[in-house]
Image (cartoon, rainbow, N blue to C red):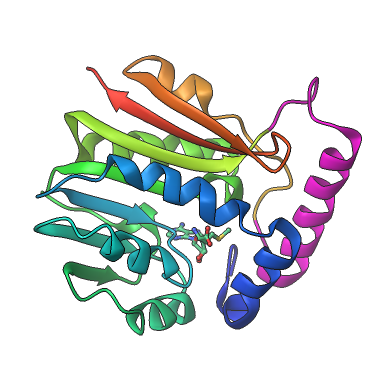
Amino acid sequence: MRNDYNGIANYYDRLSRIVFQRSIIKAQAYLLEFVQDNNRILLVGGGTGWILEEISKLNKQNVSVVYVEKSAKMTELSKKRKYKNISVEFVNSPVETYTTQQQFDIILTPFLFDNFIDKKIKYIFSKLDTYLKKRGFWLYADFVNDKQNNKAWQQLLLKTMYTFFKLTTNIETQKLVDLKGYFEEKYVMITQQFYYKHFIQAVAYRKIR
Ligand SMILES: C[S@@+](CC[C@H](N)C(=O)[O-])C[C@H]1O[C@@H](n2cnc3c(N)ncnc32)[C@H](O)[C@@H]1O
């Protein structure tokens, strides 16, 4: 299976903290400032689910999350998290096959799209876009792909990461796609924040069309 995180789920967070310290957490915590009372959130690729505890800590009223995660092991770990004051529906399946009649206030895709080839990104992006309400927020966090401005060590780290994930998860791509162009047509960028010497970005987009 491609993009199979089951084998590394148990040590994924530890590894990510060793390499990136708290940058991955900070980037996502920053985006969570957009969560308001009564929001319905579609969260795709949440990993071990630590972010559910962060959403819960916001102490907002009546927040619900649909948690779409391909890995059974990641989903199992996520279910064990402490998230008492939010309601969570777990969907253990690839987002490609997830369908719903619901409309969401927020779509959250943290370090999801770095897994896919461009064709798959196109498919998933347009699918998720139909589930987001007009004026809703798409909260996006991922690595920065900027060949001109990325430092040599960042290019090397990216290459090393893709090799590591090829060996451990059979990741389907070896190339980080810049999603900026996907958002251009219907979204405006509200804020963008960088972490880890400009190697990690957290971006909030608002759907205007
Ligand atoms: C790089 S990890 C990021 C985990 C988490 N967001 C974090 O920042 O710690 C990518 C996650 O996306 C999940 N994933 C990969 N492909 C997916 C797909 N097609 N549909 C849903 N989840 C997917 C993986 O199982 C994994 O948990």
Left or right: where does residue 2 sit relative to residue 40?
A: right
* Residue visible at 21% across and 69% down in the picture: 89
* Residue visible at 66% across and 59% down in the picture: 171
Query: Measured from the top left, where is residue 71 in percent x and y?
Result: 47, 73
Q: In the rendered picture of this protein, how many numbered marks are placed on residues?
A: 0
Query: Measured from the top left, where is residue 140 in percent x and y?
Result: 45, 39
Query: Measured from the top left, where is residue 88 in percent x and y?
Result: 21, 69
Q: In terms of depth relative to the viewer, which is nearer, 130 or 28?
A: 28
Q: In terms of depth relative to the viewer, which is nearer, 203 or 33?
A: 33
Question: Which quadrant holds the C terminus?
Answer: top left
Residue 149 visible in this rendered orientation of the protein:
yes
- Residue 80 falls inside the magenta stretch: no
Left or right: where does residue 122 sit relative to residue 41?
A: right
Q: Magenta: predominant secondary structure element?
A: helix
Left or right: where does residue 115 sit relative to residue 61?
A: right
Q: Give the extent of the magenta segment.
A: 145-171
- Residue 147 falls inside the magenta stretch: yes
Left or right: where does residue 26 sit relative to residue 98?
A: right
* Residue visible at 61% across and 58% down in the picture: 22
Residue 172 position by quadrant: bottom right
Query: Measured from the top left, where is residue 149 in percent x and y?
Result: 79, 22
Residue 120 visible in this rendered orientation of the protein:
no
Residue 43 vs 93, above or below: the answer is above
Residue 79 vs 149, above or below: the answer is below
